Image (cartoon, helix red, strand yellow):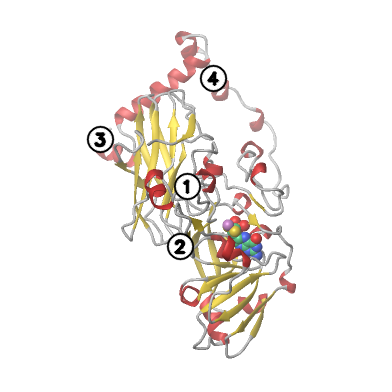
Amino acid sequence: MDETERDTRGLSLDRRAFLRTGAAVGALAAGAGAARAESTPDPLITEVQPWAKGWGDGVDATPYGLPIEFEGDVIRRNVPWLTADVISSINFTPIHALEGTITPAGCAFERHHSGAIELKKEDYRLMINGLVDQPLVFTYEDLERFPRVTRTYFLECAANSGMEWAGAQLNGVQFTQGMIHNMQYTGVPLRALLEEAGVKPEGKWIYVEGADASSNGRSIPLEKAMDDCLVAFKANGEALRKEHGYPVRLCVPGWEGNMWVKWLRRIEVTDQAVESREETSKYTDTLADGTSRKWTWVMDAKSVVTSPSPQMPIKHGPGPLVITGLAWSGRGAITRVDVSIDGGKTWAEARLAEPGEKMALTRFYFDLDWQGQEMFVQSRAHDDTGYVQPTKTQLRAVRGENSVYHNNAIQTWWVKPNGEAENVEVS
Ligand code: MTE
Ligand code: CO
């Protein structure tokens, strides 16, 4: 094998030799001894299997497909003790088991304050009123006639990692960092609709409401509304799912999830922020001195290793190990991710699967020849503003420990020699 072949195959000779040995060792462990392991034929190779002896399903078996049953544990999960009921509640994206960056809608986390409602396109109306030249009402079909755009963005709930402020608590990245999803949205720039209504010079804010009982009313500065907000009616190429705001939701790129109003029904242009009960009591961070950090809408850069992690133990022995995870920043694009296996004492640069996109998830890989030792695995994100993700100690020094929201600290997984991983903190 010459150099070219090496390069195109992406594996060096040593590594390929190792993988062969690894397979032999695997067979040995499964069989009774080395000689037998090597001489016993593997029926999966030598025998015609049942699935090759008959017909598979016809094309009409599943008009809209679900994942195969063997992947049945890759699902959203909730933490029953977190909320009093499942109506005003949260579940979590199984980010430990996903790859790439796009979150399939069927397992993308949901957060509702009064449940997911059913609203038909025909019954859909969007009103723009307040400080505008011409109050307007749009139907779904009206929205479809505006020039539209397609953009990929992450949505992170401000409460993501909130349970981890005081110490390592939940044993799974799905629960510690899984209040996030990343979809490719199609919709109309909010700017186009506001311009259609004509914003009066006194208009400085918009107050946005959903059609559900909670309405989830939020104030957003006009500057952001005119910049990159989207009135979205598709996600990942298909209609929004009921739980994500069908038929229309607002996207507020890079900003905390609670502003992404679902089942969008009304936008009022105002001269100041409307103080809803939510804004005064929620999503503010109480600092150590008792003062509040308010209106912190942009989600700071964050990253996490998704595998290995408590739900993704290493199942093979020492040798080649793929460490992977996700990074994102509400302020821009991820430019670099570092990985540490010694709890942050030393760092090495990870490989980005694709160049970071603004306000969207970025996948990273770190290929390691693991010696089977215990590791304290961490990742650290850098964004294009120069911001570097803080450690828990650094974040607590600034914010204290009374906060619930906006925890973007570095996560540590203690990976043991047997491959199991645990959520821990290192000082
Ligand atoms: N919009 C409405 N109308 N009602 C809601 O309860 N919850 C908000 C936001 N928009 C909410 C809403 C919160 S707190 C979050 S984090 C996101 O929606 C969650 O979006 P998702 O369900 O698509 O994950
Ligand atoms: Co939220």
Sooner in the amino-acid sequence: mark 3 or mark 2: 3
C-alpha distance separating marks 4 and 1: 56 Å
Residue 16 x %, y % = 35, 29
Q: Is residue 66 above or below residue 147?
A: above
Q: Do tag 3 and tag 2 residues touch (Cβ < 8 Å)?
A: no
- The part of the image, by quadrant, that contains residue 311 is top right
- The part of the image, by quadrant, that contains residue 425 is top left
Q: Name the front one of labels 2 and 4.
A: 2
Residue 276 is left or right of residue 304, and the answer is right
Q: Which residue is mark 1?
A: 401
Residue 61 x %, y % = 73, 47
Q: Is residue 322 above or below residue 204?
A: above
Q: Which mark is residue 42?
A: 4
Q: Which mark is residue 2?
A: 3
Q: Callout 4, which amino acid?
A: Asp
Q: Which mark is residue 298?
A: 2
Sooner in the amino-acid sequence: mark 1 or mark 3: 3
Residue 41 x %, y % = 53, 16
